[in-house]
Image: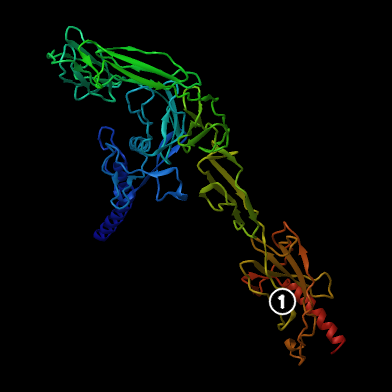
Amino acid sequence: MRKRAFIRVLHTFSAVALIVAQFILPANVALAQGGNNGNNGKPGPVDTGTAQPVWCQVIGHGWTAQLGDSNSGNNPNRAPLTQLPAGAGEGVYIDQTSGQVYAPNSADPALKGLLDAQCAAEYTVAPPQQIVVCGANNDTITAAANMTISSDSDWSGNLRTITFTADSPYTFLVNNAYTGSETVTYTDANTQCAPTVITPNPTVTVDQICGPQNDTYTVSTSADYTSTAGAWTDGKLTVTFTANAGYVFSNGLATYTVTITDNNEPCEGPTVITPNPSVNVTDICGTTDNDTFVVSTGHYTVNTGSWLNGSRTFTFTANEGYLFSNNTTTYTVTITDTHTPCAIHIDQPQVSQQAICGKDNNLVTIGSGHYTYTETVWVHNKLTITFTADQGYTFENGTMTTVVLHDKSGPCLIAPPKYTQTTVCGANNDTVAISEGQYTITNDTGWVNGTRTITFKADKGVRFEKGKDGKEYTLTLTDKNTPCIAEYSTQYTYNDQCATLHDTLTLPTDTNQVSYSYIVMPANDMYTLGYFHVTINAKTGYVLDAQGSTAISYNVALYNGPDLTCLGRGGIEPTPTPPAPVITVATAPVAAAPTVTELPHTGPTDNGNAMTIIGLVASFVTYGAVLGLQQRHPA
């Protein structure tokens, strides 16, 4: 007996210990998993089976990490975390299939802080740095990855202002708040460009001609420099070369000189002057003799003459010991004034622009005149028009001029989206049709507890008249929740039983729209047996007619005929004819049958509901009265 009692006590203790272990041990394990495990504040290892995907979203002014199974509603401002935060612990990992970070759903504040910081690091971008290009207003700025340029002032007065818009869901960090755009003003570095070294160096080629200081020479030419030759002095001549702006010679200077020495070869007889003297004419517009000229120099003198009827003759005389190629000591050159009409000065072309909302679409109007023009397309809010004056005409600064226009008009404003809500009976059943427009639907919650929220995003270049910065508009709808009209029947079957007090009704079966029930109402006097009170109730979400009635009722009289068969007298109870029901409507907001006082009973049931026919004592009294009448008035 003692052994059996000990075994029972041991079994009882084991069962209690097992129950305690089931509650206490998991709690201790959970605390160990969720705690720091002594890792100097870093999240400890956890059961990866409880990990969930980490999503990043800006809430308020900061990035917040959220754990969940999916991106509900495909929220464009919610993005997966794909980079592991340093020191997150063993429970945080990257799923090999989706590439998304998973973390345990714990309340560890250290882990939460690491995930928040990693979301900010992964989805925060910064405006690009300018690339320095030598010269004034030459630095370049190009949008970096995950952003676009929404407005650009271009360089003006060494400054340039650009607004960058981050691609969703990326953000900028501006004044300790995360936002979708940032405006930056850049200053051009205006660095000095390094000069280009001219190679090869300029040259002077000498051709020996007999006679003192008579050698000829040829100077090299280039678009990178000009040259000036001096005169022969003591048998020497120096040519000075000057580099154009932005160029230097190999000596690092903007000038380079070459000095040649005359061979002074004695001549046999007169020296022939080559080449012959020349006069270079520069056309000057006008009808008078006003062309300019430059006369060559050499071993000769010149008489320039004067203009006469548009002509002018130059007479060259060779120095002693020299002859011209015609074997004479004189040589003449005659020039003619072209009398070119002067170009007519015209005003700067008239150009105007009409601001049209949107990007790069202002309407440009160009006045007519003695010129032609070409124009570029709008690029980054800038359009360039180049004008060329017609023949015989000139602008103030030459035959060509340019006009640069800037499109500074803002985005177009559009009205909120139009919609049509069609009422459909029942909860969360209304249909909604959205008209097309310059926007897209970024989120639609569908009907939730009678409310539906639809978020729209304006297309590029337009803004909503109302809404968040004009970029988004939120439409909130309420379902009308109109009840549906239920289908029901007033048909019934009267079940005549032996003794009237046992009579019952059979009603239609309940549906998902209506329910049927009845109770037996007692008689008001000794000459009647009472009646069945039938009620049809509409279920939630339904009504019974267009007026919104939620319940109707009608009465069926108990059959008051002889029950001689039940008393053994050979009488036959006739089959009753059911009377037509009289419908009584209970209008909304009535939601149930009217309250009726019932007598205590046990008896037949309908649709699972107990029904009171009549009190037992009242039944026998009434039944006795009927029998007495039957005895007085036999059938």
Give the vertical position of 216 relative to 449 (above or below). Answer: above
Q: Which type of secondary structure does the marked residue at label 1 adopt?
A: loop
Q: Nearer the viewer, residue 590 or 9?
A: 590
Left or right of 126: which side holds 235? Answer: left
**Above or below: residue 324 compared with residue 400:** above
Where residue 204 appears, as percent x and y from the top left, is 19, 20
Image point (37%, 22%), residue name: 136
Whole-percent x and y of residue 269? 15, 15
Residue 159 drawn at (x, y percent): 43, 22
Q: Position of residue 329 (x, y in %)?
A: 26, 15
Q: Quadrant of the N terminus?
A: bottom left
Q: Is residue 117 left or right of residue 517?
A: left
The residue tagged 1 is: 491
Residue at 82% over, 75% down: 528
Name the image quarter holding residue 320: top left
Q: Is residue 253 visible?
A: no
Residue type at tag 1: Gln
Query: Tag count in the figure?
Result: 1
Q: Residues within 10 Å of mark 1 (few under 14, many from 20)?
A: few
Q: Nearer the viewer, residue 351 or 65?
A: 351
Residue 378 shows in the view = yes
The residue closer to the viewer here, 345 or 356, is 345
Q: Dividing the picture into quarters, in which one does residue 109 lie?
A: top left
For the C terminus, which image quadrant? Answer: bottom right
